Image: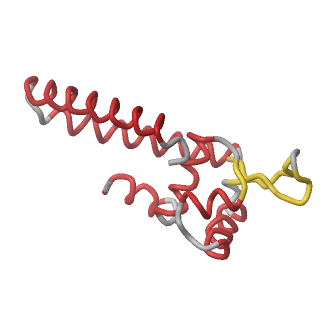
Amino acid sequence: MRGWTHFAKSTGLSMSQFSILMQLHHKGPCGMSEISERFDVTPAAASQLVDKLVQSGYLERDEDPSDRRAKLLKLSHNGAKLVEEGMNERHRWMDELAKNLSAEEQKKISEALDILTEAARKLEIVNPKS
């Protein structure tokens, strides 16, 4: 987590703002109400977080085709590039970390991650809005 926090801060974004970018990367475009719900913040707080991301050029607001009064948020080209840079930095950090582990430790971690991945998959099936 420290790696993500350091990367987010190096970009001038808060962890909440970087998390919004990651959510949009993984789950696709969404409305402000979804941001508010996903991050358990008030609509006003969600709006403040998003406004800085739009002003910084990381997000774009488009008209929602199903409701012309509403706006959809999506990653801009710069936002997608920033997310990719963050993921690359995270992978680099994980590779560096793995170099300090024995083959047996790496195997145990791999098995544990497989278990966690399967548990997350089952949870997503039971509760798909999470």
Q: Nearer the viewer, residue 100 or 72?
A: 72
Q: Residue furthest right?
A: 68
Count of number-bearing discs: 0
- Seen at 40% across and 43% down, the residue is 89
Q: Compared to 114, does 39 lie above or below?
A: below
**Where does the image place residue 13, in percent across and percent down from the top left?**
52, 64
Residue sitting at x 21%, y 32%: 112
Q: Residue furthest front?
A: 126
Quarter of image, res 107: top left
The structure residue drawn at horizontal position 66% and vertical position 54%, both measured from the top left corner, is 58
Asked if 108 appears above or below 58 in the picture, the reply is: above
Q: Is residue 79 left or right of residue 100?
A: right
Task: Indicate the position of residue 79 as horizontal and vertical percent values.
Answer: 63, 48
Residue 71: image x %, image y %? 81, 56
Q: Position of residue 54 (x, y in %)?
A: 71, 61
Q: Quadrant of the N terminus?
A: bottom left
Nearer-the-camera pick, 15 or 123: 123
| Occupied quadrant, residue 109 | top left
121 left or right, relative to 94 = right
Q: Nearer the viewer, residue 123 or 106?
A: 123
Task: Locate residue 43 relative to residue 10 in the image: left or right.
Answer: right
* Visual colour scheme: secondary structure
Query: Taking 89 as reference, is 57 above or below it?
Result: below
